[in-house]
Amino acid sequence: MLDLFRELLLSWVILILVVYGLKGRLLKVSILMLIIVGMISLWLRAELVYTVDYGINGLLLTSDWVDISKGLLVIVCVSLLLMYSYKSQEKEGGDSWIMLVLIVLLGSLLLVSSVNWVSIYLALELQTLTLFILVAIRKNSAYSTEAGLKYFVLGAVSSGLFLFGCGLLYGVSGEMSIQGINSVLIGDVGKILITVSLLFKLSAVPFHMWAPDVYEGAPTITVALLAVMPKIGVFSVLVQAGLVSNVVLFCGVLSIIYGAIGALNQTKMKRLLAYSGIGHMGFIIFGVAIGSFESIQASLMYIIIYVIMSICGFSVLLFLKLTRALIIEVGSLSRENPVMALTLGLTFLSTAGIPPLAGFLGKWLILLSGVSSGYYLTCMVIVMASVIAGVYYVRVVQIIYFPNYFLLTWQKVINRLEVINLRKSILLGVAFFIILFIMVSPNWVLQVTHDATISLYL
């Protein structure tokens, strides 16, 4: 019960902030509260040394894996709040947006520690229902309303499949805990339905159809949340649940291929990032499908690097304030702000997997685990897909440094870049530093992911 204290504390924080938000703005108070929750979590981690995992009332589990996932979620939430600006994003919900993000964090924290399909479903729906609101939070935008409606309808179908799968598993095994079901069943229709539902949340092919439209219609800062935080929770469940590996492997490889090809003809930045996210989820899912110790560690390493790259990339895009979210709008950046242009350019090159940047390390570890497990042909296909994906990442870098200024004249007149404030500068600097130098000294990340993966086998 002691380890559940941080979730209970966050729940009380949310309730207090709801009352406080009636009189004051929540941004600084929310960041402070999250830092306090994180420090308490570190203190609890120092006080409680886990030799084996233990459960809380058969619904929640505590382990190194869970703690690393929770720490990553808190870092993402703090980063999103640091990106947020009242001045430029008042129309995107104001205090309501901050409160909803904290609720998503609470749902995600409960999700990564859940070991019972009932608790997984409840935590997943707490997270998903809040995301429905965040996507459609722009009341006067037809694009936002359309995106929210599409996400809601397809999300409801996904939740229905999840519940139907849980019902089938309980009918066959009489169990609702993950460990109990895995000890009775290896493969079942119920597990396939649950796998499909979780892959939908990860926007894996062929359950990706919602991602480009939702990314395009949602506010940019909501897209940053949608691209990272739900993926961490679902990834953690996917690893711990031991679902149907053949389905996961097939969807992972398809996601890598489709994510590479689908983004080639995109002209809008957020749609390009949607296809990019599909490809990255394919790499992560491929590592989970292999199922070896090294591949799961590589997947955890990959998602950590993906989170850092996403924070850095979205921080720059929010700073740019793109009027129509077109890729060509980043063209004037190299002349107006060379440092920011270098940051965005190297972030995209890292995302493409160009050495010696951080993205290369993640892809190399995934491919290494695949080759070690005998997936030679699959790894060759993945390498070719990565080369194709590199084309559109390099194209963005080319537009940054060699733009068509005739097309951007109107943008320079209408939209002027502002001076970035201190908290955003610190966030961007730390993320960019990790992208540049994680290849120089990756031992600390490898040690953390190694310890987390070991806890899955205890």
Image (cartoon, grey):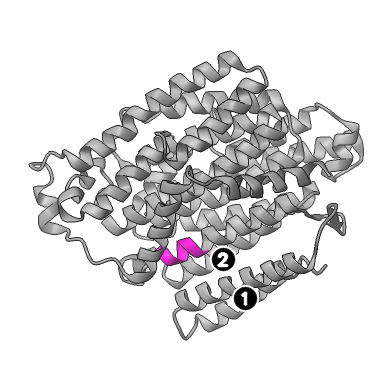
Q: Which mark is residue 45?
A: none
Q: Residue at x 46, y 39 (%)?
A: 359
Q: Which mark is residue 102?
A: 2
Label 1 sits on residue: 13
Q: Is residue 337 above or below residue 358?
A: below
Query: Number of numbered discs present?
Result: 2
- Range of magenta residues: 78-83
Q: Residue at x 80, y 27 (%)?
A: 188
For this view, does 21 lie left or right of residue 407? right
Q: Position of residue 363 (x, y in %)?
A: 51, 32
For this view, does 419 lie left or right of residue 261? left
Residue occupying the far top of the picture: 377
For this view, does 387 lie left or right of residue 172? left
Q: Position of residue 340 (x, y in %)?
A: 27, 54
Q: Position of residue 280 (x, y in %)?
A: 50, 36
The amino acid beneath tag 1 is: Val
**Secondary structure of the residue carrying numbered label 2:** helix
